[in-house]
Amino acid sequence: MKTHLITLAEKIKDLDPVDALRFFAEAYPGKIVFSTSFGWEDQVITHMIFANNIPIEVFTLETGRLFPETYYVWNRTLEIYKKPILAYHPKAEALQEMVNKKGPNSFYESVENRKECCGIRKLEPLKRALNGNKCWITGIRSEQSLNRNDMSNLEWDEQNQLIKFHPIFFWSLEDVKAYIKENNIVYNTLHDKGFPSIGCAPCTRAVREGEDFRAGRWWWEDQSKKECGLHATT
């Protein structure tokens, strides 16, 4: 697989993100997906895919705890591009069991409970969304957190057994904002209110000046890596 990744990296090294997305869509027809959470970066890639009619399936994880602003962007994106965005929900039985046993906000009580909630609402649905695919497109950028600096724009996801490609991995936040403005792309207004990273509403707050990019995620936990497991780096 390492040799294959090197070959792919060589083929896309001089391509812009749109042409790289076209390349992967042709390389893995019907087996390539893009996951969106409707943040800045994901809206950029959604525009690249939909505006250029690139045959990549777009999906999202509907955790049931998203911000109203996120649902607004989701709906507007459907209206603008007239393209489907598939929603993957948590399994009702597992969710009901957790909530009935521990209540609706058990994730505040311990890291174990929070990971259980993420597992039910995000990780298990993600497994279903990725099942049978060979390439996963994401909106990850290298500068978003320290552990992501160790990643590459093209990698093998051992956990999900597929290739991951991050088309705007080397973009700065200013690059993202400029592209959104230039292409008049709808985006989540929470970004203008100090939310650089937007997840579930109970688990996300605005970031204060000087704080890390992901300090607003699971802010009540004392940990160095603000990840839920969707993009495991080990």
Image (spheres, grey):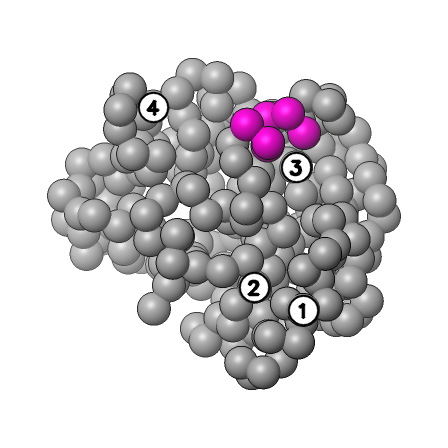
What number of labels is visible? 4
Tell me if label 3 and label 1 are in contact, CB under 8 Å.
Answer: no
Return the disc, 4 or 1, that comes first in the chain's sequence: 1
Above or below for 57 versus 191: below
Labelled disc at residue 154? 2
Amino acid type, mark 3: Val
Return the disc, 3 or 1, that comes first in the chain's sequence: 1
Left/right placement of residue 84 relative to residue 165 reads right
Tell me the element at label 2. Answer: strand
Amino acid type, mark 4: Ala
State whether residue 211 appears in this view: yes
Where residue 121 appears, as percent x and y from the top left, is 41, 52
Taking the magenta stretch, the answer to whether it contains residue 9 is no
Tell me the element at label 1. Answer: helix
Residue extent of the magenta highlight: 174-179
Disc 3 vs disc 1: which is toward the camera?
Answer: 1
User: What distance separates the C-alpha of mark 4 from that of mark 1?
Assistant: 39 Å
